[in-house]
Structure formats: C-alpha cells, structure tokens
Image (spheres, rainbow, N blue to C red):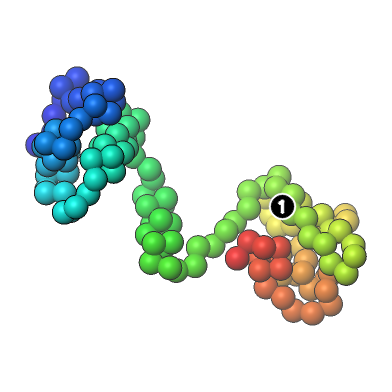
Amino acid sequence: MTVPTEMQPTLDAIERFDRSDCLAEWRRMFGAEPPPYLSVSFMRRVLLWKRQCDLDGDVSSNTWRTLERIADGRRVASHPKPGTELIREWNGRTYRVRVTEHGFEMEGARYRSLSAVAKRITGAHWSGPRFFGLA
C-alpha cells in the first residue's frame, strides 16, 4: 500500500516518535515487523532515511550492489574519474599521474592502464590499483 506523500509524517514528526509510533510507522513503511531489540533512536534514523528516500529518490541500483559487496566483505573496484590526479612516492621520488578519458598520463607519456604506469615507475609488474592505493 502506497500512502500519498502529503499523508506521510514529516521529518520533524519522525524525530519526536516514541517507541509505539516507531513500530507503527516501521510496519507501514516497510510492510513488515522491525527486527527485535531495535532502539527507538535507531528506528527513528532508519525511518528518517526511508522518508528522505521517498521524498528525494533512493540510491541507484549500482550503489546498492556496491553496498552489498562491501557488506559481504567482497572487493569493490575503484575507478577514478577523468581529471583525478594520483600521487605516489617511490624510492624518494614523487610521481603524478592524471586520469584521462582513455587511460592515464604521466610525464607527458600516455598509458592504457595503471599497471603499465606502475611497471614504468618500478620496473616490475605490479597491480596498478594496488600500487596507487586504490585496491
């Protein structure tokens, strides 16, 4: 059952809910009983978050998948956006790598992967994301 937005409690009202109000609103918002032993403070925070999602839109499905991976303890790939500058010190020298639309640039040279950049710096095969602290 969807309750019209204008009939849902305001954020200010949720902040003043007592335990019975929280339980009733939880059942209405989620269509299920809340887990046992939740504090009123925690239920208020979850209800506020859910209400904000209802008002402003929920997080993207991609963000949900990433959060689920993190919660399961799985690795999450990090892809820096173009324009990002990665800085790494190696053997007393500082290297600056700029992320571009098609790869990476360092000292005027272009590279297709961070691993290629790491190999250029160290002379050995490295995981580029690990070398730059992204993994």
Image quarter of residue 40: top left
| Any part of residue 110 in sight | no
What percent of the width, then of the height, locates residue 133? 67, 63
Image quarter of residue 50: top left
Which one is nearer the viewer's eye here, 48 or 68? 48
Please state the total of marks drawn on the protein image.
1
Residue 128 placement, left or right of 88: left
Label 1, secondary structure: give it. strand
For the N terminus, the image quarter is top left
Residue at image position (16%, 54%) is 36
Three-letter amino acid code at disc 1? Val
User: Taking 14 as reference, is 86 above or below it?
Assistant: below
Outermost residue, top direction? 6
Residue at image position (63%, 48%) is 81
For the C terminus, the image quarter is bottom right
Image quarter of residue 79: bottom right
Residue at image position (70%, 47%) is 84
Outermost residue, bottom direction? 124
Residue 14 placement, left or right of 114: left
What percent of the width, then of the height, locates residue 103? 70, 57
What percent of the width, then of the height, locates residue 76? 50, 63
What percent of the width, then of the height, locates residue 5? 20, 24
**Residue wearing tag 1:** 99
Residue 5 placement, left or right of 114: left
User: Taking 131 as reference, is 41 above or below it?
Assistant: above
User: Taking 96 as reference, is 1 above or below it?
Assistant: above
| Any part of residue 39 in sight | yes
Which one is nearer the viewer's eye here, 70 or 23? 23
Q: Mark 1 packing: few (<14 Cα in 10 Å), some, or many (20+)?
A: many
Residue at image position (63%, 61%) is 134
